[in-house]
Amino acid sequence: MAVVLVLRARGLGDLLTAVPALRALRRARPQDHIALAAPHRLKPIVDLIASIDEMIPTADPAGIRWDGAPPALAVNLDGASADSIAELTRVHADRVLTYRNPAFPEVAGPDWQIDMHDVDRWCHLLESAGISADRRNLGLVPPVASTSHRDCVVVHIGAGAAARRWPPDRFAAVVRHLLVQERDVVLTGDETERDIALGVAARAGLPITHVLAGQQNLIELAATVAEAALVVCGDTGVAHLATAFGTRTVLLFGPTPPSRSGPPPHLLGRHAVLWAGQVGDPDADTTDAGLLKINVPEVINAIDKQLRKRPWPGTGLDRRAQQAYRRVG
């Protein structure tokens, strides 16, 4: 049996944008053994994708522990870095499929395009090798959790970096508005963000029992997102979970344009995307200046529209976000 080794040693959102590509590989090579090198904590979501035969716990692109026979194909869905390409060449695969890097002139591949949506990026890579991919194949079957929060509004206060985290006092104002509207609200985030979530709850008058940040495992978080009436969050993996489960969202983007990592254009009817049109450093230690331009009334207005299940005017984007999509498309 031939082996296909896929590298995607990144976070939750990154994994979810690669789902159409992973499923395309499965369709193209139904008899092969597909192994995915990715962080072990993502295994519950990998199982929902239902296209992977084996998971190789890998937290860093330069840390694959591959003891098997050389793969027939190694696929780099991690990026175009020298580290990731070097690691895949070390496993002595018959072929490496990757975006081109000047440090490896002997490894062919398409050129990296920065202004390309992440879902398109990985499908395009496979298509460059003659493997057709369906960009719409993003959906996941919702998991079942022991505790249900059906029809709640999930306010996810977390982010992978401070640059992408909207200020807690603004989240608190949003939660207060939702409570006045008699909506059931829960706050989510990881264990490092629980104190932030508790502060938001205290400012908003939300009971501590509704603070789920740091109290859920990944499958429980996924189930909460799948059951929600609405998810309010920044540019995070939770936003991609909502896209996968078809849950409506209000998404606060900055400093990365939604044209690169937001909901794909064909799904924008379910998502209200707010972006100030200002690009910045997504890994900075302070909140991005563009993200700060998104104010509380804008977010509340978008929330109210989504909860009434009225489509966002036009294509589902504000004017600046529409322009961002047009620039890419």
Image (tube, rainbow, N blue to C red):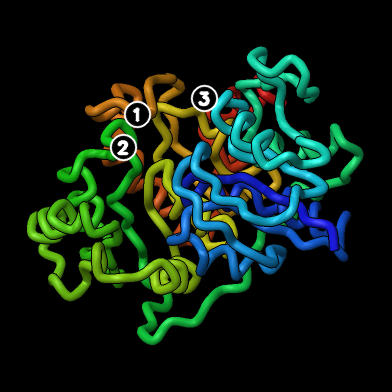
**Label whose residue precedes the other's in the sequence (3 or 1):** 1
Point out which mark residue 320 bears: 3
Point out which mark residue 131 bears: none
**Label whose residue precedes the other's in the sequence (2 or 3):** 2
Please give the name of the residue rendered at 40% of the width and 30% of the height, measured from the top-left corner. Answer: 254
The answer to whether the residue labelled 1 contacts the one labelled 2, judged by CB atoms less than 8 Å apart, is yes
In terms of depth relative to the viewer, which is nearer, 316 or 243? 243
Please give the name of the residue rendered at 79% of the width and 45% of the height, measured from the top-left corner. Answer: 73
**Type of amino acid at the residue the image marks with label 3:** Arg
Please give the name of the residue rendered at 18% of the width and 51% of the height, measured from the top-left corner. Answer: 172
Which quadrant does the C terminus fall into?
A: top right
> Residue 256 location, x and y as percent?
46, 28
> Is 231 on the left or on the right of 137, as rendered?
left
The answer to whether the residue labelled 2 contacts the one labelled 3, judged by CB atoms less than 8 Å apart, is no
> Residue 197 location, x and y as percent?
18, 56
> Is 284 on the left or on the right of 115, as rendered?
left
Point out which mark residue 161 bears: 2
**Type of amino acid at the residue the image marks with label 1:** Asp
